Image: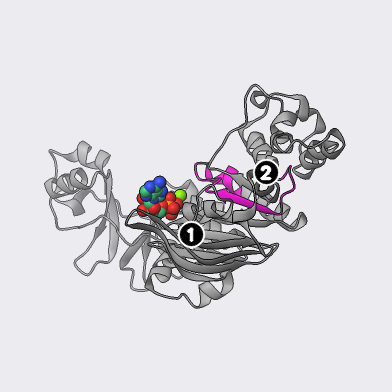
Amino acid sequence: MIEFIEVEKRYGAAVAVEKLDLTIEDNQFICVIGTSGSGKTTLLRMINRMIEPSTGAIKIDGVDTTGLNEDELRRKIGYVIQNIGLFPHMSIRDNIMIVPKLLKWGENQKQGIAERLIQKVELPLEYLDRKPKNLSGGQQQRIGVIRALAADQDIILMDEPFGALDPITREALQEMIKRLQQEMKKTIVFVTHDIEEAIKLADKIIIMDHGEIVQYDTTETILKNPANEFVEELLGKRKKQSHIGNDMRIADLMFTQVESISLSKSIIDAIRQMTNKKVDSLLVVDDEHHLKGFIDIKDIDRNINKVTNVYEIMRTETASVNQREKVADVVDPLLNMELKYLPVVDDDNCLVGIMTRSSLVSLIYDQLK
Ligand code: ADP
Ligand code: MG
């Protein structure tokens, strides 16, 4: 158990972390989230005294950490900073065993640890004798994670460890760290600025704003009862994605900002609009906003001296989809059609949005979670 008792951190007159009380129970996955500068790193680093609190006490299993020396703290608490890579000149085994070595563990104590850990992340034992450069980037990241577990501390502190990774690698590592935390019964305090990541990983979330904890509760409770507007806004960022599922409708995923032009406008108007908005096609609507077709820059180019109005060259064979249809049903047409997007209409055939290929990408990606 980690207890903060009236802990505060000031730098001169500036408050990094306001006076707070906080208890973190054992075997919990705790995510700390908040805007930049809200005090997340400070809160985290006070736990292992990389940062000394200005006032108050921090206890681990009832023992005030002021009384512990550096080695004792290291034995209890592991620390992983953002994107720290492996040491290139050391073997994978030596990389994994850095902290046990720092703690001067005996040979007996170190026996078999690297082997056990590498099997936990489904990499072959032979890799232990390789250099990092002979592993793929994703494999190196997995080694980075198990390195944090090698000294078997009860508490692991992680400060935006997956911050700069591509989404696919990141997903894989999130799943891995969550699984290992449960299997190995660790308490993890994990700083992130990504609400999706926090919701995916955390048993409980600490939400920080301007050095204060504005909410600390189970993920479920926070989702159901956000403490204030700040939390609501933070959660709002994920609303769009949270709908995504098998029966998701077009209306949930479409973009409502659409470049359209009235069929009575001139070709010059169309060119101007395309230039201003940096698009190469426009949907064409009538005065009641019914979808009538589309025009493409190539069509304009071919007819520039022959015609004057949009309706004379627009193509009327435009595919469209009703906003109440299922997203799953438009995957094929969207991937196979000429347009890069699909116009979305309501029951009166009025244009209400577009579905893009990139909105599908995020849909497909979301279902991998
Ligand atoms: P976060 O990790 O949430 O981005 P930090 O905990 O790093 O925020 O910082 C919290 C606040 O404390 C910030 O306003 C930051 O500028 C300030 N701060 C952090 N470290 C120092 C320092 N060594 N000296 C002065 N101010 C600091
Ligand atoms: Mg930080």
Count of picture labels: 2
Quick check: marks 2 and 1 in contact, CB under 8 Å? no
Question: Label 2: which residue?
Answer: 71
Q: Residue furthest bottom?
A: 225
Few, some or many residues within 10 Å of mark 2 (<14, 14–19, 20+): few
Location of residue 366 (image quadrant)? bottom right
Q: Residue at x 76, y 37 (%)?
A: 123
Q: Which mark is residue 33?
A: 1
Displayed quadrant of residue 119: top right
Q: What residue is drawn where x is 65% and y is 34%?
A: 140
Q: For the residue marked with disc 2, what is the amino acid?
A: Asp
Asked if disc 2 is less than 8 Å from ligand 1, the answer is: no
Q: In the rendered structure, does residue 77 fall within the stretch colored magenta? A: no
The percent coordinates of residue 334 (x first, y second) are: 46, 52
Span of residues in magenta: 148-171
Q: Amino acid at mark 1?
A: Ile
Which is in the foreground here, disc 2 or disc 1? 2
Q: Looking at the image, tell me whether mark 2 or mark 1 is earlier in sequence order.
A: 1
Residue 227 placement, left or right of 47: left
Quarter of the image for the C terminus: give it.
bottom right
Identify which residue, 134 or 323, lies in the foreground: 134
- Please state, as top left, top right, bottom left or bottom right, where the N terminus lies in the image: bottom right
Q: Secondary structure at mark 2?
A: helix
Q: Position of residue 153 (x, y in %)?
A: 71, 50
Q: Is residue 164 magenta?
A: yes
Q: Which color mode does the image show?
A: one colour
